[in-house]
Structures are given as C-alpha cells and as structure tokens.
Amino acid sequence: YLGAEFQLFPHALVGLACYLRSRAAGVAWLGAAILVSALACGILSHEHEIEPSIISHGTSKHLYFFAWTRAAPFCVGVLLGMHWHERQRPAGARADDDAAAAGCSRLQRAALALLRGEWASEAQVGLAYAACAGLLLAVWLLPWTFIREGDAFGGSGGWTRWQTDLYHALNWPAFAVGLAGLVHMLISGRAPAPLAAAFSAPVFDWLAKLSFGAYIWHFMIMQVTIASYQSDLAMDRTMFVMLTVGVAFISFGTSFVSYVVVESPLARLQNLMLAARR
C-alpha cells in the first residue's frame, strides 16, 4: 500500500500544474480522480463481492493496494491545501486574482470562489462542519449494522449487495471529507472550546509523531494477526472491538520503538549533516 501512496505523488504534481495554469482545471483534475476512485471501489466491490471490512480477503486483495482505489482521500487533502493557499494569499495578490478572474469564464470564477470558501456564510460553514462530523460517524458506525448478532464477517451480514458496494464507493471519500472538515474547523479557530482544548493536549504531540509509523505498521500487524488463526475468524462485535483496540495499541507501540530506534536518530543525523553544510 505504500507503493500505491507513492504513485499518487506524481498525480498530485499534475493536479498542481493544472491548478497553476487554471484553478478550474486543477479542481476538475482532482475531482475527476475522486470520482474515478469511488467508482472503481464500487465496481470492484460488486465484481468480487467484498464485505465492508478491512480485514476481509477481498478488501486487502482488490481495494487496499492500488493507487486508483486510494486516490480519493489523497486528492481531498490536496484540495484542502489549495483552499488554505487561496485563503492565505496576501491582499494584493487576492485583488490581482479577482481582477484577472473578472475577465475569465464563469467556471473559472466559480473555481476561485469554491477554493476560497466564499460561497458559504458562517451559518453554512457550521452546517458543513456538522455534516463532516456526520460523515466520520457514518464511516465508523455503519459497518456495525452489517454484523448481525450471532453472525460474522463471512457472507451472512445484514446488507444487500448494492448497499455494500455503495459503502465501498463512498467510504474513503466520505472519511476524507469528514476529516478535512474537522481539520479546517480546528485550524480556522471555529472549534468549540472543549474540543479545541482536547486536541491541544500534549498527548497529541506524541500521537502526531507516531501516527505515520502506526500507519506503516498497522496493516502488517493486522494481516499477521488474521493469518495466525488456523481457520476463518468469526468476527462478532465484541471480537471486532478487541481486534481494533489491540491492533491500534500494538501499531502505536511498534511505532514508538521505530521512532526511538530509527526515525529520531536519523533525524538528528540529518540535522548534523545540514548544519555542517551551512
């Protein structure tokens, strides 16, 4: 899956090149990639009858390792970066952009307004944040409705085929949009005071340092865990929670070890090498 991530970097460069040429082209390039990624996930889900679980064989084989299925969250992140770039441009540059856009097509002006967020009032922004929170909760909680009591991930869940395909198509885009909304709310200073204080706790400094390592390690740990069972894993709701918590704990623990043994020493060595060249 890391190979898939690295394939997306050139795609982002093409999107940025389009953006520098025309904001509408940049938005269209990234929006098309999100649409193609969602359609690919839905079609593959239907073709291979994949269940709504990352631990199912079909998910790991057909959805998790390819750039065209993982593109949507990446492109949403790039669009969020473009938005902040537009919002933080100096006033003079923004005025020049407005003057240039006045002579452009309606599509170009719409792309500029979309990236700046000028289309939304404060009340609409609040509703958008609430919708983003709803998307995050839906992505996390909907798979629970697939598991019927006494059943397991294994073809006897409570969803129809088209519902499962729709979930796979919208799962990653919805999570990315929801997470982007949460990040936007925190960075823009619009978060409620208790939520802002919670995310400002010192523990999140360490989680930020360990999160990429946990991302690197988690899938390997999850696959080793599943492969260690001699037969198919009966994944009822209790076991699902235990496995999720256990994989998260081991992933962050392994990430801490790799941070202390590998990342931190290499970062210090890099700083020494750069300091010597100054």
Image (cartoon, helix red, strand yellow):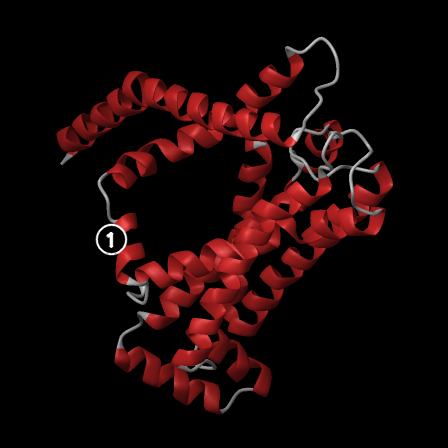
Vertical relation: 255 (above or below) 26: above
Element at label 1: helix
Q: Amino acid at mark 1?
A: Ala
Disc count in the image? 1
Left or right relative to 160: residue 68: left
Q: Quadrant of residue 125?
A: bottom left
Q: Is residue 240 depicted above or below 77 in this figure?
A: above
Horizontal and vertical percent position of residue 11: 57, 50
Residue 81 is situated, as x and y percent measured from the top left of the image, at: 42, 59
Residue 218 coordinates in the image, percent (x, y): 51, 26
Question: Is 85 situated above or below 218?
Answer: below
Q: Nearer the viewer, residue 276 or 123?
A: 123
Image position of 8 (left or right of 258): right
Query: Which residue was labeled with disc 1?
Result: 197
69 sits left or right of 253 in the view = right
Q: Residue at x 74, y 34 (%)?
A: 62
Residue sitting nearer the eye, 26 or 128: 128
- 100 to 179, vertically: above or below: below
